[in-house]
Amino acid sequence: MRRLASELAFLGNLVKMNLASAMEYRAGFISQVLGMLINNGIYFLFWLIYFDRFAEIRGYRINEIYLLFAVVAAGYGLAYALCGNAARLPALIAEGRLDYYLALPRPVLPHVLMTHCQVSTIGDISFGIVAYLFTGRFSPLDILLFGIACILVAIIMVAFATLFGTLAFHFGSAQQIASQAQNAIVTFALYPAGLFQGWVKFVLLTLIPAAFVGAVPVELITTHSAGALVRLATFALAIALVATLSFYSGLRRYESGSALNVNL
């Protein structure tokens, strides 16, 4: 327990240092956050225009769309604000830049993932909170489930990015496929689940688990379903375990890039 507490304190200090470093240049920090807020708002305009003409789409009304965007945006922002290196993992592996982390007496994977913060994703978190305010779901249970859903979505996104990032251990360059996979899970998650049927729906529950990032969290919050919570939590833990095993398995194949001096 003492060792666990020490590691958690270390990771907490990493987060503080990342945020302090990001806020050192206030103008750049604010511009990135506002830029992401505006970007998300423009994307959301499509749905506002649609629901101005139609009442619903496959069981989703405007409030469910607000909730969908809230969960996906907040979960995505939380994922990459805390574990920004998840998106950069293929490059770190291919360039031999894991040397720095291997030289330190800390768990390699969480140290790698949490050393970098994507500043713009704080704008995603802000957008998610603002979108949630429009849902009208302010009961203590709704707020609690929203928080739990965002945390589980963040875990899924980090694990998914890590899993594709570990392909670099085997293929050398995996930046392109990892980036496409990360974009795909967010893109498909922002559409109502009822739009997809058959084999497409199967893919969105397995290979590109977008349903667990968007549809299942929305179901959890709107229905207070214990089954939805169990499915979401089980999948989050399962993909996190698979990603961790894939990383440490691939680490055996890792070839040093002698990049220790770069990080110092």
Image (cartoon, grey):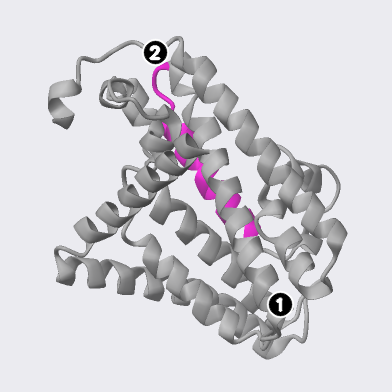
Q: Residue at x 74, y 85 (%)?
A: 54
Q: Which residue is mark 2?
A: 254
> Mark 2 to mark 1: distance in Å?
45 Å
* Residue 27 locus on image (x, y percent): 16, 71
Residue 13's spot in the image, x, y percent? 32, 50
Q: Is residue 86 visible?
A: no
- The answer to which quarter of the image holds residue 120 is bottom left
Classify mark 1: helix, strand or loop: helix
Indicate left or right for 30 with 143 as reference.
left
Q: Which mark is residue 142?
A: 1
The answer to whether mark 2 and mark 1 are in CB contact below 8 A is no
Q: Residues within 10 Å of mark 2 (few under 14, many from 20)?
A: some
The mark nearer the N terminus, 2 or 1, is: 1
Image-quadrant location for residue 223: bottom right
Front residue of 246/179: it is 246
Residue 35 lies, with reference to residue 249, above or below; the image says: below
Residue type at numbered disc 2: Tyr
Please give left or right for residue 229 compared with residue 39 in the image: right
Q: Residue at x 45, y 40 (%)?
A: 179
* Magenta span: chief secondary structure: helix
- The answer to whether residue 88 is left or right of residue 130 is left
Q: Which residues are magenta?
A: 172-190
Is 189 part of what is drawn in magenta?
Answer: yes
* Tag in front: 2 or 1: 1
Answer above or below: position of 125 versus 250.
Answer: below
Hey, what amino acid is under mark 1?
Asp
